[in-house]
Image (cartoon, rainbow, N blue to C red):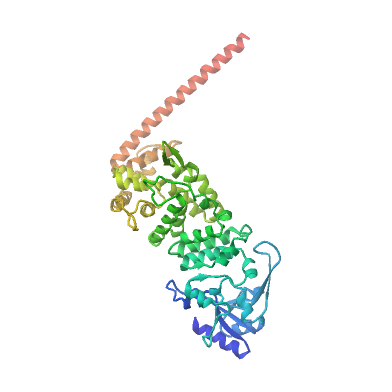
C-alpha cells in the first residue's frame, strides 16, 4: 500500500502537487497500534480534481467514491485518495452541509477541519515529514483526545460519540475543554445508523467498552440515544449479592468482562448487546421488600424497555431476536451452576437458548466473580459438561413428523402439539423407539379427549337450539 501511495505522490509532485498520509493511519502508526493500521487515506494538495483523476488513471482504474467531495479510490486497493475540502453548515441537521473541494486551502486549514488533534496529523508520503499544527503528537504521547477547533468540531454532532468511541478503544482521556464543548452539542439530529456505527466500534474493538458510556455520562450525553443505560444509574441492588454498587456499576463491569469472550461467541455484537441490556428490567422492577432490595422478574419484565432501546439503535432483526431470546434466560445458567439440577432441566434451558454456548459464556460475565479477579466462581465446568451432553443428545435419532405419519397417525390441527410432546421426550433423553410409542399414545389420548369434547359441545349446542325452539313455540 505504501508503494502505491509513493507512486501517487511522485506523480502528484511532477505536476506541482503534494501528497500526505492523513487521519487514522498516521495516528496509529505513531502510537504503534497493535490492532492493525486502518485503510490508508491520502490527501493530495495543489491539484485540480480533473488533474488528480487523470493521474490516477495512469495507475489503475479510479473509482469516484464521492466525486463532488473530491474522494477517489483505485479498484482492487484499500486506499482512499482525497482532495482537501471545506464544509459549511447550512442548517441544524447532520446532512445540512455545503461541501466543496479546495485543493489550495493548504495543510494548516485542511488539518483544522478534522476532529481531534491526534487525527489532524499529516505525514508527507515522500519525505516522511510529520506536519503537526495543533500538538497532536504531544496529545498522542499523553493519551489525550482534544478537539482541534470549536466551530468545526461542533458542525458534526457525531464527533461527540467519536470522542467516547476513541476513548474506549485507545484508552485515552478526553480533554476537559472537549468535554465542556461536547456538553453543548445537540445529538438529536443524528441518524440512528451513524449512532450505531460508533457504538458498534466501541463494543467490538475496545478493551473496556464501559469507557464509551462513562465518557458520555461525563458529557451529559446519554439521554438522547442511550436513555435506558442512563436510567441504570442509582438503581440499587442487594449488597449481599452485588457489593460492587448500583446497576450501572454492575452493567459496566459485565460489559467489560464480556469483551474477554467476544472472540469465543457466535456473534460478538449481539453478545455485547446482551451484556449491556441484561439488567434493563431492574429499572422497572426494583423495590424494597421487608428491608431487602429485590428485582423480581426483571429478566422478563424488562422486555419492553429492551425492545425500545433496540428499536432505536439496532437495525439488524437477527441481532434483536438474539437479545430478546437470551435476556430472559440469563440468570438460569448461574442458578444451575450451583444447584446442579437434573439433566432434563439443563437440556430444556439450552434448547430454549438461541445460542446455548453464548449463554454459558455470559454466565461467566454476569456474576459472581471472585473479589478483585475476573475469575468465575461458579462451576463453569459443570455448565460446559451439560452443554456437551445436550449437544450429544441433539445428535441422536429423534421422533419427527414423518415417523408419526409412517406409524399411521394422520396429520391434523393438533400435530404441532403432538410434535412438541415428542420434543419434550427427546430432551428427557428418551430413546427414539420408546419416544415414538409414547408420542403415539399421547396422540391417541389427545384425540380421544378432543373428540369427546367436540361431541359434548355438539350435544350442548343441540340442546340449546331445542330449548330455544321450544320457547319460540310457546310464544
Residue drawn at point x = 49 percent, y = 19 percent: 460
97 with respect to 252 (left or right): right
Question: Residue 23 placed where, x, y %?
Answer: 54, 75
Furthest-bottom residue in this view: 14
Question: Residue 473 placed where, x, y %?
Answer: 61, 10
Question: Residue 336 placed where, x, y %?
Answer: 32, 46
Is 121 above or below relative to 265? below
Q: Quadrant of the C terminus?
A: top right
Q: Nearer the viewer, residue 117 or 304?
A: 117
Is 462 above or below relative to 48? above
Is 287 above or below relative to 256? above
| Image quarter of residue 426 | top left
| Image quarter of residue 332 | top left
Residue 8 visible to an observer of this rendering: yes
191 with respect to 304 (left or right): right
Residue drawn at point x = 62 percent, y = 65 percent: 156
Q: Nearer the viewer, residue 375 or 42?
A: 375
Furthest-top residue in this view: 474
Residue drawn at point x = 39 percent, y = 31 percent: 446
Q: How many marks?
A: 0
Residue drawn at point x = 58 percent, y = 88 percent: 11
Residue 75 visible to an observer of this rendering: no
Q: Nearer the viewer, residue 401 or 270?
A: 270
Question: Residue 162 placed where, x, y %?
Answer: 54, 65
Amino acid at each position: 500500500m505504501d508503494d502505491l501511495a509513493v507512486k501517487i505522490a511522485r506523480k502528484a509532485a511532477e505536476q506541482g502537487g503534494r501528497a500526505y498520509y492523513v487521519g487514522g493511519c498516521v495516528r496509529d502508526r505513531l502510537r504503534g497500534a497493535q490492532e492493525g493500521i486502518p485503510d490508508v487515506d491520502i490527501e493530495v494538495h495543489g491539484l485540480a480534481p480533473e488533474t488528480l483523476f487523470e493521474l490516477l488513471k495512469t495507475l489503475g482504474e479510479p473509482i469516484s467514491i464521492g466525486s463532488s467531495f473530491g474522494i477517489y479510490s483505485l479498484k482492487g486497493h484499500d486506499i482512499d485518495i482525497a482532495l482537501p475540502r471545506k464544509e459549511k453548515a447550512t442548517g441544524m441537521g447532520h446532512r445540512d452541509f455545503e461541501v466543496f473541494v479546495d485543493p489550495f486551502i493548504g495543510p494548516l486549514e485542511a488539518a483544522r477541519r478534522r476532529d481531534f488533534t491526534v487525527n489532524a496529523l499529516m505525514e508527507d508520503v515522500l519525505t516522511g515529514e510529520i506536519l503537526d499544527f495543533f500538538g497532536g503528537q504531544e496529545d498522542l504521547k499523553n493519551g489525550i483526545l482534544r478537539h482541534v477547533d470549536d466551530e468545526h468540531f461542533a458542525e458534526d454532532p457525531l464527533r461527540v460519540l467519536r470522542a467516547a468511541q476513541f476513548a474506549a478503544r485507545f484508552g485515552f482521556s478526553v480533554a476537559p475543554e472537549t468535554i465542556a464543548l461536547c456538553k453543548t452539542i445537540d445529538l438529536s439530529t443524528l441518524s440512528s445508523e451513524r449512532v450505531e456505527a460508533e457504538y458498534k466500534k466501541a463494543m467490538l474493538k475496545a478493551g473496556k467498552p464501559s469507557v464509551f458510556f462513562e465518557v458520555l455520562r461525563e458529557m451529559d450525553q446519554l439521554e438522547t440515544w442511550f436513555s435506558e443505560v442512563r436510567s441504570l444509574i442509582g438503581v440499587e441492588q442487594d449488597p449481599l449479592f452485588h457489593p460492587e454498587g448500583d446497576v450501572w456499576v454492575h452493567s459496566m463491569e459485565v460489559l467489560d468482562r464480556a469483551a474477554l469472550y467476544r472472540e469465543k461467541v457466535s456473534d460478538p455484537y449481539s453478545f455485547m448487546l446482551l451484556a449491556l441490556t441484561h439488567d434493563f428490567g431492574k429499572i422497572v422492577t426494583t423495590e424494597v421488600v421487608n428491608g431487602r432490595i429485590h428485582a423480581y422478574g426483571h429478566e422478563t419484565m424488562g422486555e419492553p424497555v429492551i425492545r425500545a432501546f433496540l428499536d432505536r439503535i439496532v437495525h439488524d432483526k437477527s441481532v434483536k431476536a438474539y437479545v430478546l431470546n437470551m435476556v430472559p434466560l440469563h440468570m438460569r445458567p448461574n442458578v444451575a451452576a450451583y444447584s446442579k439440577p437434573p439433566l432434563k432441566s439443563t437440556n430444556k434451558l439450552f434448547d430454549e437458548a438461541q445460542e446455548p454456548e453464548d449463554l454459558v459464556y455470559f454466565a461467566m460475565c454476569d456474576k459472581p466473580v471472585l473479589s478483585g479477579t475476573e475469575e468465575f466462581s461458579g462451576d463453569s465446568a459443570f455448565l460446559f459438561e451439560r452443554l456437551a451432553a445436550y449437544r450429544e443428545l441433539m445428535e441422536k435419532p429423534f421422533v419427527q413428523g414423518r415417523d408419526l405419519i409412517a406409524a399411521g397417525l394422520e396429520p391434523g390441527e393438533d400435530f404441532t402439539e403432538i410434535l412438541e410432546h415428542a420434543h419434550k421426550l427427546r430432551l428427557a433423553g428418551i430413546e427414539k423407539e420408546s419416544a415414538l410409542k409414547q408420542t403415539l399414545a399421547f396422540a391417541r389420548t389427545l384425540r380421544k379427549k378432543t373428540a369427546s369434547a367436540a361431541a359434548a359441545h355438539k350435544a350442548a349446542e343441540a340442546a340449546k337450539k331445542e330449548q330455544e325452539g321450544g320457547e319460540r313455540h310457546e310464544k
